[in-house]
Amino acid sequence: MQELSGRTAVVTGAGSGIGRALALALAGEGVAVAVADIIPANAQQVTDEITAAGGKAIAVECDVCCRDSVATMKSRVLRELGAVSLLFANAGATSFEYLPDMDQSDVDWMIQVNLMGVTHCLEAFYPDMARAGDGHVMATASAAGLLPGWVPYHAPYAAAKMGIIGMMLNLRIEAAEAGVGCTVLCPGGVESGMKDNNARYRPDRFGGPQEGGVKIPEGFFQQADLHFRPASEVASLCLEAVRHNRPMVLTDSSLRQTYLDSYHQTVMSAFDELEAFDGQPG
């Protein structure tokens, strides 16, 4: 998909961070953008930025955890902007918690907003693209899903993000047959404000908004040597991935060795152990 201008995009979680950067970048390419966010004021602020610069956008309140909310968003976007050929299922939430200290609402929130939020958006928009034989879908996972044994106190989040990676790489097989592009974004550190604002957007049914930032293990970022990339640069990487239908977008090249030393090594060691077992006499 080399030409983006004239298309319509839906971006969830677009009121801040990566989603905001994506919405602004898309509008700059001549794309009409549905700026979707659970906080209406945030969506409206980004929409105002776009329209003030001469772009076309509408602000849409959407809770991606709820199928009905996503369906309502779709109806409005189709009515006001037309057929959608670009989907960025980006809304997400994070937490760092010792698993025994998490209650059911904590776990449900991580799974619902991250994994099921992406699923609900794909259910709403992908079938139309497949029937049209045109479009591109991108979902935001995380380096924590690609490196599930790397970040401590992150189990439900890592599970949800790893699920997104699996879903998108598998969907890519059938999407190619339908003429639709498919990409998964696995960001590392990004200057997004998510760790400070994340819990304020928590719906009541998942425990409600909470003040204060995400509780990050002391010294984690220093120990992990995590590099934080501006959200605008992440958006540029994403649009290049759409143009070239790349399967995955990463944002931190320093994590290459971490991947080789962690998840890759875990899988390869398991193969070695299996081969050693199979080589034993019965």
Image: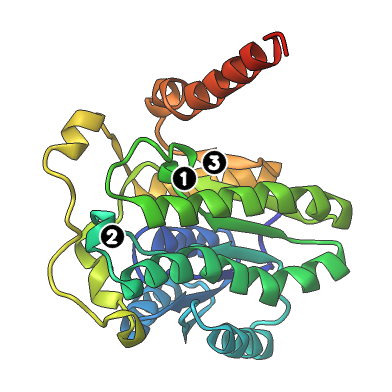
Q: Is residue 92 above or below residue 151?
A: below
Q: Residues within 10 Å of mark 2 (few under 14, many from 20)?
A: some
Q: Quadrant of residue 212?
A: bottom left
Give how far apart the Cα atoms at labels 1 and 2 are: 17 Å
Amino acid type at circle 3 is Val
Element carrying mark 2:
helix
Q: How crowded is mark 1: few (under 14 residues within 10 Å), some or many (20 or more)?
A: many
Q: Quadrant of residue 102?
A: bottom left
Amino acid type at circle 1 is Gly
Q: In this view, does 28 lie above or below 265?
A: below
- The image's mark for residue 267 is none
Residue behind mark 1:
145
Residue 250 visible, this angle: yes
Query: Which residue corresponds to the image point at 56% horizontal and 62% vertical from the top-left?
Result: 88
Residue behind mark 2:
194
> Marks 3 and 1: CB-CB under 8 Å?
no
Query: Which residue corresponds to the image point at 23% horizontal and 67% vertical from the top-left?
Result: 197
Q: Residues within 10 Å of mark 3 (few under 14, many from 20)?
A: many
Position of residue 135 in the picture relative to residue 74 (left or right): right
Nearer to me, 99 or 127: 99
- The image's mark for residue 249 is 3
Amino acid type at circle 2 is Met
Element carrying mark 3:
strand
Position of residue 279 in the picture relative to residue 48 (left or right): right
